[in-house]
Image (cartoon, grey):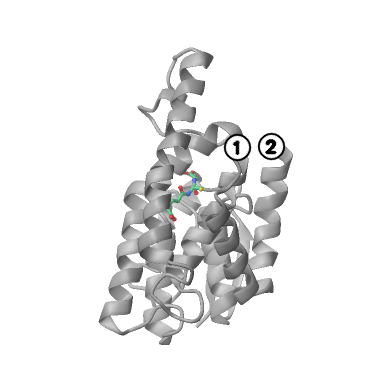
């Protein structure tokens, strides 16, 4: 089975799956989808026009997207118990973290960082509106300040000086969270100390599987500082 990953190098959603595939030791190839996600050819396979997306022959539709769902599917398929434990209680922690991440943390990350990254904002948001620059700056800042609460939940409930899912090594939820912290280097305030230490812990545990895709994100973030 060969996996083809469509990805955008500066994106932490994409970094997540790039790190996962390397850490999992799966055979894959990846290609840069810059400028192609809205093409008829791409949308015929991936109608949501999103990256990361994988194509693989075994999948009932031949392709799928959503970083967490991709990691869950491939972990299930290949029995990657260290990354996504089958123990129901440990898995409950990981699933809860990833759903909380997707529903609560990431929307704030996007509003706090996309304007600085030069990424498009979602329709209906202040940054995508005709509001003044002052109003847009205030909305961005409010989102950055609001991040403190869900980040505190990750610190005290999920991470607790270790890894999400209470294992000795990083899980798919750690990959998802640590990659995302890369974007918060663009905030007005430095990353909280626990988050910096946590990200370092995840990177040290995953080695080049993390550092190689991280270099693309860090290069881009560095160019926007
Ligand atoms: N929740 C999704 C978010 C994916 C997403 O927003 N992808 C963006 C890049 S960060 C994208 O591919 N946009 C291209 C487009 O909409 O055409 C995930 O975690 O995979």
At which x and y percent is residue 164?
42, 70
The secondary structure type at the circle numbered 2 is helix
Q: Is residue 87 visible?
A: yes
The reply to whether dot 2 and dot 1 touch (C-beta < 8 Å) is yes
- Up the image or down, 222 lies above or below 155; here it is above
Q: CA distance from mark 2 to mark 1?
A: 6 Å
Q: Say few, some or many: other residues with alpha carbon within 10 Å of mark 2 (under 14 / 14 to 19 / 20 or more).
A: few
Residue ID for mark 2: 224
Reading the image, the residue beneath label 1 is 117
Q: Position of residue 172 (x, y in %)?
A: 45, 70
> Which residue is found at the position 26% from the left and 81% from the top?
88
How many marks the image carries: the answer is: 2
Query: In the displayed structure, does residue 139 sit left or right of residue 27?
Result: left
The image shows residue 194 at horizontal and vertical percentages of 53, 57
Find residue 204 and name its label: none
**In this orientation, which residue lies closer to the viewer: 201 or 29?**
201
């Amino acid at each position: 089975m060969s996996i083809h990953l469509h990805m955008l190098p500066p994106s932490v959603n994409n970094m997540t799956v790039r790190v996962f595939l390397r850490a999992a030791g799966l055979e894959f190839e990846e290609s840069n989808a810059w400028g192609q996600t809205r093409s008829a050819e791409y949308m015929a396979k991936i109608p949501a026009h999103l990256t990361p997306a994988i194509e693989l022959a075994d999948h009932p539709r031949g392709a799928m997207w959503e970083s967490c769902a991709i990691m869950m599917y491939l972990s299930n398929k290949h029995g990657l118990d260290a990354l996504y434990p089958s123990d129901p209680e440990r898995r409950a922690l990981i699933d809860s973290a990833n759903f909380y991440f997707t529903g609560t943390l990431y929307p704030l990350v996007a509003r706090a960082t996309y304007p600085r990254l030069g990424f498009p904002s979602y329709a209906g948001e202040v940054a995508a509106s005709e509001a003044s620059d002052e109003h847009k700056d205030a909305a961005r800042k409010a989102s950055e300040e609001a991040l403190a609460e869900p980040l505190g939940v990750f610190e005290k409930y999920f991470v607790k000086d270790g890894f999400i899912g209470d294992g000795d090594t990083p899980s798919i939820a750690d990959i998802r969270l640590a990659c995302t912290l890369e974007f918060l280097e663009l905030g007005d305030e430095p990353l909280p100390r626990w988050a910096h230490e946590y990200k370092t812990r995840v990177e040290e545990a995953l080695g080049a599987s993390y550092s190689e895709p991280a270099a693309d994100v860090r290069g881009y973030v560095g160019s926007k500082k």
